[in-house]
Image (tube, rainbow, N blue to C red):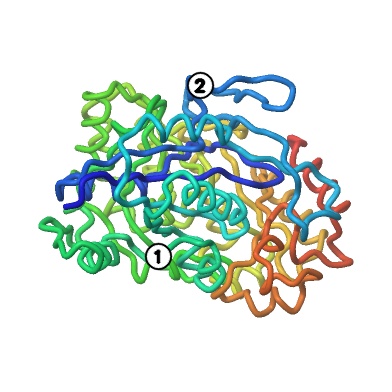
C-alpha cells in the first residue's frame, strides 16, 4: 500500500450552516479501511470547531457549542459567487480559515495521494477552492473527490479540477483506482452487503470528539420523491443490533463518549429487526449515554412500547420526518406516513414521558406547486397534536422523483447551476409561497399551540 494518504473534509460555503451532530463518518470509515490495508492515514477536518490554531475577531466569529455535541461552526464572511450576487444575504465560509488549514497540512508528512469528500451539490465552491489550494500546496499529487456531490452530480463535479471523481461507495471504487495508480491490491475489503464486516470509523483521528455518530443501516426501503437516499444507496442494508450496541459500548468504554447520534434514513423501520432489540440492550446495560436523532425518525411503527423503550434508553433529541399533513401530497410523495399514524406516534411518545418541546417534527416547505396555506395547515396540525413543528426547506436533487417538476417550477436554472439548488433560496417558490410568506411560516412554528 502507498505510504501517506491525506483525507480532507472541506469547508461549507453557504448562507447558513449549523452542526447538528455532524461528523465526516464516511471519510472516517474510509480511513479505517485504508489503515487496515497498510496506509498511513491523516485527516484534516475543515469543519473542526475546536481547532487550537483558530483566532477570532471582527471577521471570524467563534463557534458556540453544547455539551451534547451540536453547535455553530467558526465562520468568516466571504464574497458571494457570481450567480448569487443579487441574493440579499451574507455568504460565509464555515470552518477553519485557509491559513489554519495550510498550517495543519504542512505539519503532516507529504501525502502520496489526497482524498476529499463532498456533501451538498450547492457547496461546490468550497470543493473547487480546496482543490485549487491542494494543487498549489502539493503540486503533482493527485486529488480524488468522492461523496454525495459527485454521486448525484457527476458531470458538474468533473469541473472541480480533481484528477479523479468517484461516484458511489468508496470501498467499490478505491481498490480499482489504487490498482491502476500503483499496481497494488487491497488485501482487506469489507462485504458491502454485510455492514458489520466494516471496521469501526477512525474516530481517533478527530481532535476533540464530543459525540459519535452510529451507522445502523444504509439506504431506505422507501422511495420518497424528494429524497436521494435510493440514488446514493442501491438498496436497504442493515446491521445486526447486537453489533450496533457493541460499537456504542466500545466508544463509551474506550473514549468516554456520552452522546451518540443516528443519521440513518430508516432507524425505526421494522422495529423488531433493529429498534426494539437495540433499545433493550442499551437499557439492560444501563449505559449513562444519550442519543440524538436529527435526521428524522420513521413514524409509522412508533408504538407505546417503542416510545417507552426510547425514553428509558436515553433518546433525548427526537425528530420525526412527517413532511406534510396534506393527504394527497403524502400519497404522491411516497406514502410513508399518514395523519392517523402521526397522531398515534405523538400520543405514544407523550405517554412515554416526552414533552411537546422534546418532539420536533420536520415539515417540508417549498415543494413544487406547494402553497403557504398547505404549510400553515401542516404546522397547525402538528401543534394541535402536541408537538413542535420545524420547517425543512426543500432542495431539488437531480434524479429524484420531483426533479423534473422542480426544473419546470423553479424561477432559477437549477439544472445548469447547482448553487440554485440551495434550500435557503426556496428554489421552487411560487406566487402562493413567496419568501415573505415563508418567513411568516417560520414565525408561526414558534407558537406553542
Give the x, y percent position of residue 266. Answer: 41, 56
Give the x, y percent position of residue 329. Answer: 66, 70
Report the disc number at residue 52. none
Lower sequence index among marks 2 and 1: 2
Neighbour class for label 1 at 10 Å: few (<14), some, many (≥20)? some
Residue for badge 2: 53
| Residue in view at x 81 percent, y 70 percent | 411
Classify the position of the C terminus by image quarter.
Answer: top right
Q: Report the Cα–Cα distance between label 2 and label 1.
A: 31 Å
Q: In which quarter of the image is residue 41?
A: top left
| Residue in view at x 38 percent, y 62 percent | 219
Task: Please state which of residues 221 and 286 is positioned toward the viewer in this rendering.
Answer: 221
Q: Can you say whether 202 is above or below 49 in the image?
A: below
Q: In the displayed structure, does residue 21 sit left or right of residue 178?
A: right
Residue 65: tell me if it is visible. Answer: yes
Residue for badge 1: 164
Q: Can you say whether 129 is above or below 209 in the image?
A: below
Q: In which quarter of the image is residue 412?
A: bottom right
Amino acid at each position: 500500500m502507498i505510504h501517506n494518504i491525506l483525507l480532507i473534509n472541506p469547508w461549507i460555503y453557504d448562507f447558513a450552516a449549523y452542526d447538528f451532530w455532524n461528523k465526516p463518518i464516511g471519510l472516517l470509515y474510509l480511513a479505517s479501511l485504508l489503515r487496515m490495508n497498510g496506509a498511513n492515514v491523516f485527516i484534516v477536518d475543515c469543519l473542526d470547531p475546536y481547532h487550537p490554531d483558530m483566532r477570532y475577531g471582527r471577521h471570524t466569529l467563534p463557534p458556540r457549542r453544547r455539551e451534547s455535541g451540536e453547535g455553530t461552526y467558526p465562520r468568516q464572511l466571504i464574497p458571494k459567487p457570481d450567480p448569487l450576487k443579487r441574493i440579499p444575504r451574507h455568504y460565509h465560509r464555515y470552518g477553519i480559515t485557509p491559513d489554519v488549514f495550510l498550517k495543519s497540512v504542512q505539519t503532516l508528512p507529504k501525502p502520496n495521494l489526497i482524498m476529499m469528500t463532498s456533501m451538498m451539490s450547492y457547496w461546490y465552491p468550497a470543493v473547487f477552492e480546496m482543490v485549487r489550494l491542494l494543487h498549489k500546496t502539493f503540486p503533482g499529487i493527485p486529488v480524488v473527490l468522492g461523496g454525495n456531490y459527485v454521486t448525484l452530480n457527476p458531470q458538474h463535479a468533473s469541473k472541480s479540477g480533481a484528477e479523479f471523481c468517484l461516484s458511489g461507495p468508496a470501498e467499490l471504487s478505491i481498490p480499482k483506482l489504487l490498482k491502476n495508480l500503483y499496481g497494488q491490491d487491497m488485501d482487506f475489503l469489507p462485504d458491502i452487503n454485510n455492514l458489520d464486516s466494516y471496521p469501526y470509523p477512525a474516530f481517533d483521528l478527530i481532535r476533540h470528539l464530543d459525540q459519535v455518530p452510529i451507522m445502523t443501516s444504509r439506504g431506505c426501503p422507501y422511495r420518497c420523491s424528494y429524497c436521494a437516499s435510493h440514488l446514493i444507496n442501491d438498496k436497504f442494508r442493515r446491521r445486526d443490533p447486537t453489533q450496533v450496541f457493541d460499537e456504542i459500548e466500545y466508544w463509551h468504554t474506550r473514549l468516554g463518549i456520552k452522546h451518540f447520534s443516528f443519521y440513518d434514513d430508516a432507524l425505526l423501520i421494522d422495529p423488531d429487526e433493529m429498534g426494539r432489540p437495540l433499545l433493550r440492550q442499551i437499557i439492560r446495560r444501563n449505559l449513562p449515554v444519550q442519543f440524538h436523532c436529527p435526521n428524522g425518525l420513521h413514524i409509522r411503527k412508533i408504538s407505546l412500547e417503542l416510545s417507552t423503550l426510547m425514553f428509558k434508553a436515553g433518546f433525548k433529541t427526537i425528530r420525526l420526518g412527517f413532511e406534510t399533513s396534506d393527504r394527497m401530497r403524502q400519497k404522491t410523495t411516497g406514502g410513508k406516513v399518514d395523519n392517523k399514524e402521526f397522531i398515534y406516534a405523538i400520543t405514544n411518545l407523550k405517554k412515554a414521558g416526552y414533552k411537546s418541546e422534546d418532539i420536533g417534527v420536520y415539515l417540508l416547505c417549498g415543494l413544487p406547486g406547494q402553497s403557504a396555506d398547505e404549510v400553515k395547515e401542516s404546522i397547525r396540525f402538528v401543534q394541535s397534536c402536541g408537538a413542535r413543528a420545524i420547517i425543512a426547506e426543500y432542495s431539488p436533487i437531480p434524479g429524484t422523483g420531483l426533479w423534473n417538476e422542480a426544473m419546470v417550477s423553479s424561477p432559477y436554472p437549477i439544472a445548469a447551476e447547482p448553487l440554485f439548488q440551495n434550500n435557503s433560496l426556496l428554489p421552487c417558490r411560487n406566487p402562493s409561497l413567496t419568501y415573505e410568506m415563508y418567513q411568516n411560516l417560520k414565525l408561526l412554528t414558534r407558537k406553542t399551540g
